[in-house]
Amino acid sequence: MPPPSTPSRLSAGALAALPTVRRIAVLRPNAIGDFVFALPALHALRASWPQARITLLGREWHRELLTGRPGPVDEVVVVPAMPGIGAPEDTPPDTPRTDDFLRAVRQARFDLAIQLYGGGRYTNPFVASLGAALTVGMQADDAPPLDRNLPYERWRNERLRLLEVVGLAGATPRELNPRLAVTAQDHAVLNDATALPHQPIVVLQPGATDERRRWPVERFAAVGRALAEAGAFLVINGSEAERPLTAQLASMLAVPHVDLAGRLPLAGLLALLQRARLLVSNDTGPLHLASALGCPSVGIYWAMNIITAAPLVQGRQRAILSMRLMCPVCGVENVRQRCPHQVSFVDDVGVDEVQVAAMAEWHAGPGGHTAPAPHARHDTTRAGATPAAGAELLDAQGVADQT
């Protein structure tokens, strides 16, 4: 068991805060949905220390997306992949590269370093090595402690968990569902990728990196056709790797649409979701982006994932749940373990459940509020990043994806 941890608090007065905080480092080098989950915590840091410089230790896609974008992050420094941090645990370490990186980032003389990337077995030693005056983060049973620690348990709401972590440093939550800024440049990127018609847009997102979270593509097609009959123009989104899947969906629609899989940069996706009247999606990055952009959505979730991924404010975000816990192939329970079968765990969600919720949001129009859809299973200030990340510190390669 780890050493006793400091109890977490969500108020600035609960724990002694640092007298002066000028530089803050936040480690979270993962995917798009994970960044959205961290937005309430990042905004809490910004509100609590408005004059501090916040450095996100992230991936290359973070730097591409956040540089120059209004928001709580001032700069992004790309973390080189290392065992347990962006690379498999059994990856041979590149010690000289890691040492060079740490020497560079220590020059920032961080007052506060925050670990928001898992249980801490690999990340806590990394954060401790940054040389900050105070370190806080999560701690699993096999992880060494930081100065202040939140015990790590798997099935917890991720947004609330991260708010608790920054609360250990004295940060106070201000916004439960902060918005991600969309710029004119984002819309220019979208316009360069495609010419969309002047009619309401519905985005279909049939992919997900984990095949257990993929709803059958033919059911996306059925819902899409119903929305097209109601007047929607359909846009299919996905990564380059998902192009065979999106092409399969496109072949089933038989209504006007455009398939943007592999063609739309992340900045353009932000503009698309801001413009869209509705998103119908598996539990994947664009679904969580929608909540940060004010885009109504219908999301298909595996039961356990709604625990970690549910937004803190429901708004126009509808969640349709599969309650399946056993693998449909071998019958093994997949909550405490994972069987090897790459099959859908959400294919027990029927077309009607999703279509009823989608049509309710469609008829609600842009903005506004609707009552829960009948028969649906469950409904549930400062300028941002600067180019200094590349100039001041270290460069490394990352991979952008939409998960």
Image: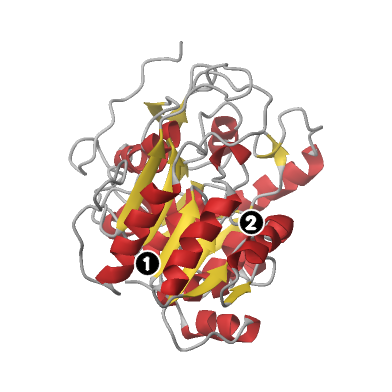
Q: Nearer the viewer, residue 330 or 59?
A: 330
Q: Residues within 10 Å of mark 2 (few under 14, many from 20)?
A: some
Question: What is the quadrant of residue 209 in the picture?
Answer: top right
x and y percentages locating residue 56 in the rendered image: 52, 55
Q: Residues within 10 Å of mark 1 (few under 14, many from 20)?
A: many
Question: What is the quadrant of residue 267 in the picture?
Answer: bottom right
Q: Residue at x 32, y 25 (%)?
A: 6
Q: Secondary structure at mark 2?
A: loop
User: Where is 81 relative to 58, above or below?
Assistant: above
> Which-is-in-front pick, marks 2 and 1?
1
x and y percentages locating residue 153 in the rendered image: 42, 24
Q: Secondary structure at mark 1?
A: loop
x and y percentages locating residue 385 in the rendered image: 50, 69
In the picture, the disc for residue 295 is 1
Q: Residue at x 49, y 64 (%)?
A: 224
The total of numbered circles placed on residues is 2
Q: Nearer the viewer, residue 165 or 33?
A: 33
Question: What is the quadrant of residue 273 in the picture?
Answer: bottom left
In the picture, the disc for residue 254 is none
User: Where is 368 relative to 93, above or below?
Assistant: below
Amino acid type, label 1: Cys
User: Where is 285 relative to 301, above or below?
Assistant: below
Mark 2 vs mark 1: which is more N-terminal?
1
What residue occupies the far top of the structure in this picture?
1
x and y percentages locating residue 217 in the rendered image: 59, 52
Is residue 54 visible from the viewing direction of this image?
no
In the picture, measured across the screen, residue 182 lies left or right of residue 13, that is right
Q: Distance between the Cα atoms at labels 2 and 1?
A: 20 Å
Tell me if label 2 and label 1 are in contact, CB under 8 Å: no
In the picture, the disc for residue 401 is 2
